[in-house]
Image: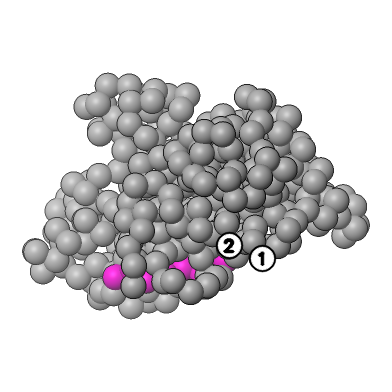
């Protein structure tokens, strides 16, 4: 099996779907002439032309509205945001139009559209360019939210998202575009709403998604050195969430630690903790523990960034706390 970068997996997913379906097109800032801000769309303008790979002005609300209107009229747009932080300007179209149109039209208008781009912290980009938006959009009925952690999942889930008849938000990370992983040569799709067991274990369940999976797996490696066997679950899809996968694991391990780059209040980890105490309370031998970004805008100073975000050290300590090895 070949090894390719995360950005290449996304490129292949979009290109394959555009070859398969002439209604699929890509629009966004710098996606065409510049080959993408992060080179995700490299070579696509040359293959598909300017009518299907479209550079837009720096006007997220405007080109998102164009995408929603196109989807309502039978096309399948992929709207790329340079970062989800910029897409705050487009949230009116995403929340009030794309998400609600099927219900408001009595089922007459589906909105088969994919919104994708970089999400979460990406180094010294300061507070207004470092937010995680999974929890915000997962709160909205009518939207599906996907956060892949590796090239294989990215390709399979993006192809599934493009074929979906509902609006899908595809959350990536600038810090993942260069990541490499094995991706099959042939076509494949992954089901939306199905988590993956990234590593089997018996002592504690660790749940995460997106680039925080790197922290989860690295922490599991450190714990293994100390004889602690962590089962690591990659959510892959935030909404709809595969609660069954989490519950089944907790019934086996009796402990749960959730790693979530979102702020702690009303977060993804909050929802998971609620569902586990509701559906697996009798199996828990310790309280559910959460590792979130600190409840503050992300700082600019490198040391404070490191202190604010989930880390291997924080996860290892949380697991030991869940196992009553430390206080």
**Is label 1 in a helix, a strand or a loop?**
helix
Name the residue: 58% across, 45% down: 46
- Mark 2: few, some, or many residues within 10 Å (few <14, many ≥20)? few
Q: Which mark is residue 145?
A: none
Which residue appears at 43% of the width and 31% of the height?
130
Above-or-below relation of 223 to 317: below
Tell me which residue sits at (82%, 55%) in the image. 74
Left/right of residue 95 with respect to residue 2 in the rendered view: right
Q: Are marks 1 and 2 in contact (CB under 8 Å)?
A: yes
The stretch in magenta equals 192-199
Q: Is 91 part of what is drawn in magenta?
A: no
Most foreground residue, 162 or 223: 162
Is residue 25 in view?
yes
Left or right position of 28 against 21: left
Locate the N terminus and report the quarter of the image it occupies: bottom left
In three-dimensional space, the C-alpha distance between marks 1 and 2, rounded to whole angstroms, equals: 6 Å
Q: Residue 312 appears at what percent x and percent y?
A: 21, 49
Residue that numbered label 1 is attached to? 20
Q: Position of residue 93 (x, y in %)?
A: 74, 37
Q: In the displayed image of the protein, which residue is found farthest to the front?
A: 46
Is the residue 275 above or below the residue 210 in the image? below
Q: Pinpoint residue 180: horizontal percent, then vertical percent.
A: 32, 56
């Amino acid at each position: 099996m070949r090894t390719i970068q995360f950005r290449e997996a996304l490129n292949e997913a979009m290109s394959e779907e555009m070859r398969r379906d002439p209604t699929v097109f890509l629009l966004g800032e710098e996606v065409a002439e510049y080959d993408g801000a992060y080179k995700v769309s490299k070579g696509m303008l040359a293959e598909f032309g300017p009518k299907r790979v479209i550079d837009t002005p720096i006007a997220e609300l405007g080109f998102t509205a164009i995408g929603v209107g196109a989807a309502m009229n039978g096309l399948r747009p992929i709207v790329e945001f340079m970062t989800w932080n910029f897409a705050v300007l487009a949230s009116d179209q995403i929340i009030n139009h794309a998400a609600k149109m099927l219900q408001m039209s009595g089922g007459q208008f589906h909105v088969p559209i994919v919104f994708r781009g970089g999400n979460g912290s990406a180094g010294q980009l300061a507070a207004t360019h470092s937010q995680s938006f999974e929890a915000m959009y997962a709160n909205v009925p009518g939207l599906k939210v996907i956060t892949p952690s590796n090239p294989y999942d990215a390709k399979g889930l993006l192809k599934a998202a493009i074929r979906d008849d509902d609006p899908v938000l595809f959350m990536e990370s600038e810090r993942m575009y260069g990541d490499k992983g094995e991706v099959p040569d042939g076509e494949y799709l992954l089901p939306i709403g199905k988590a993956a067991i990234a590593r089997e274990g018996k002592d504690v369940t660790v749940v995460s998604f997106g680039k925080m999976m790197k922290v989860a797996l690295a922490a599991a490696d450190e714990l293994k050195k100390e004889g602690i066997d962590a089962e690591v679950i990659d959510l892959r899809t935030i909404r709809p969430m595969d609660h069954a996968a989490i519950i089944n694991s907790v019934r086996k391990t009796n402990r749960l630690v959730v790693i979530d780059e979102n702020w702690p209040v009303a977060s993804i980890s909050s929802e998971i903790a609620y569902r586990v105490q509701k559906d697996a309370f009798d199996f828990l031998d310790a309280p559910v523990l959460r590792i979130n970004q600190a409840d503050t805008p992300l700082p600019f100073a490198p040391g404070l960034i490191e202190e604010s975000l989930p880390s291997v050290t924080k996860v290892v300590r949380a697991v030991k706390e869940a196992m009553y090895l430390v206080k």
